[in-house]
Amino acid sequence: MIRFVVLLTTSVLLVAACGTLGTVQLPTIVGQHFDGAGDAIGPAIVRDVLRIETRRIDNPPYGSYDTLEAEIVFTAVVTLPPPGSGPDVGGAQLAFNVGFDTDKNPATGGAMDCGAQGSTPGLDFLVLGQGGGAPADRLVNGNYNVINASWVVTGEATVSVYGSTLTVTTPLSAMGSDDGATHLMVFAGNRNGGWVNVNDCAPNPAGGIITRTGVSHGFRQ
C-alpha cells in the first residue's frame, strides 16, 4: 500500500489500453508451524516433519485469494513416486496427505488417522498422495488429486520437491472456492510392505494449523 499511487496510475493505464479496470494484488499471507523433531515413527525410511509454511496467494486476475501453498520441510530428502504410480513397497518414496478443515468445524468432514499420534477430525478436503491405487496415486501429469470428505475428486494439486522440502500448491477452487483461511494438517509416511505406514503428522498431537497469521513483504520462491 506504500505504492498505492503507482498502482493506481498503472490501473488507469490499463483502463486506457484495455478498457478494463486493473485490480491491486492482495499481499501474500504467511503462516508457520514448527513441529517437534524426533517424534517420527514407523518402518523403513522415516521422514520427520520439522516445519510447515503456508501461503495464501492472489494470482492474476487480482482481487481475491485463489491458491493455498504448503511448504513442508522434513529431516530427510523427499522422493516422490514417478508420475502415474504410487509410493513403492520398499518405503523409499513419500506417501502423504494434506488435509483442510475449510469450515473450521471438527464436527463436519472426515478424519485422518495418525496412529499413535492421534486422529484429526473435521477435514473437508484432502490432497491425496498416500497411494494404493486410484485416486490416491500420483497422476500421470505429476499432480495429485484433491478430494472431499466423500472421496469425490474436486481438483488437482501441483507439487515440487527440493531436497528435504515438499511444496504442495492447491487451487482454492478445488476446495469449494474457500478463501484459504482454513485449518491444515499433514500426514507423512510410506508404504513399506504395501501398507500405509505413519511416520509423522503435523501438528502433533493431532490438530490443525491456522493458515492466516501474517502478511508477507514479498513472496519467496
Image (cartoon, rainbow, N blue to C red):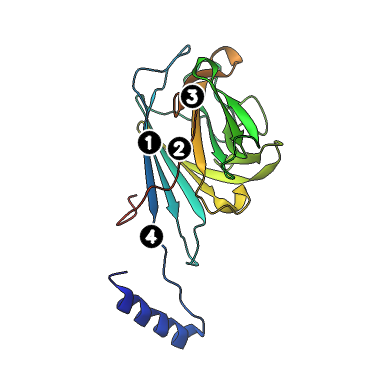
Quote the CA–CA distance across marks 2 and 4. Answer: 20 Å
Which labelled disc corresponds to residue 27? 4
Q: Position of residue 172 (x, y in %)?
A: 56, 52
In this figure, which residue is indicated by the disc labeled 2? Answer: 209
Q: Position of residue 126 (x, y in %)?
A: 59, 37
Q: Is residue 151 above or below residue 102?
A: above
Can you see residue 136?
Answer: no
Type of residue at label 1?
Answer: His
At 37% from the left and 79% from the top, the residue drawn is 8
Quote the CA–CA distance across marks 2 and 1. Answer: 7 Å
Q: Secondary structure at mark 1?
A: strand
Q: Earlier in the sequence, mark 2 or mark 1?
A: 1
Quote the CA–CA distance across marks 3 and 2. Answer: 25 Å
User: Would residue 47 be found to the left or right of residue 67 on screen?
Assistant: left
Quote the CA–CA distance across marks 1 and 4. Answer: 20 Å
Type of residue at label 4?
Answer: Pro
Query: Are the residues tagged 3 and 2 within 8 Å (C-beta)?
Result: no
Q: Position of residue 55 (x, y in %)?
A: 41, 48
Binning the other alpha carbons within 10 Å of mark 1 as few (below 14), some (14 to 19) or many (20 upward) gives some
Eye-nearest disc, 3 or 2? 2
Binning the other alpha carbons within 10 Å of mark 2 as few (below 14), some (14 to 19) or many (20 upward) gives many
Type of residue at label 2?
Answer: Ile
Q: Quadrant of residue 74?
A: top left
Binning the other alpha carbons within 10 Å of mark 3 as few (below 14), some (14 to 19) or many (20 upward) gives many
Which labelled disc corresponds to residue 33? 1
Query: Are the residues tagged 2 and 1 within 8 Å (C-beta)?
Result: yes
Q: Nearer the viewer, residue 141 or 77?
A: 77
Q: Earlier in the sequence, mark 1 or mark 4?
A: 4
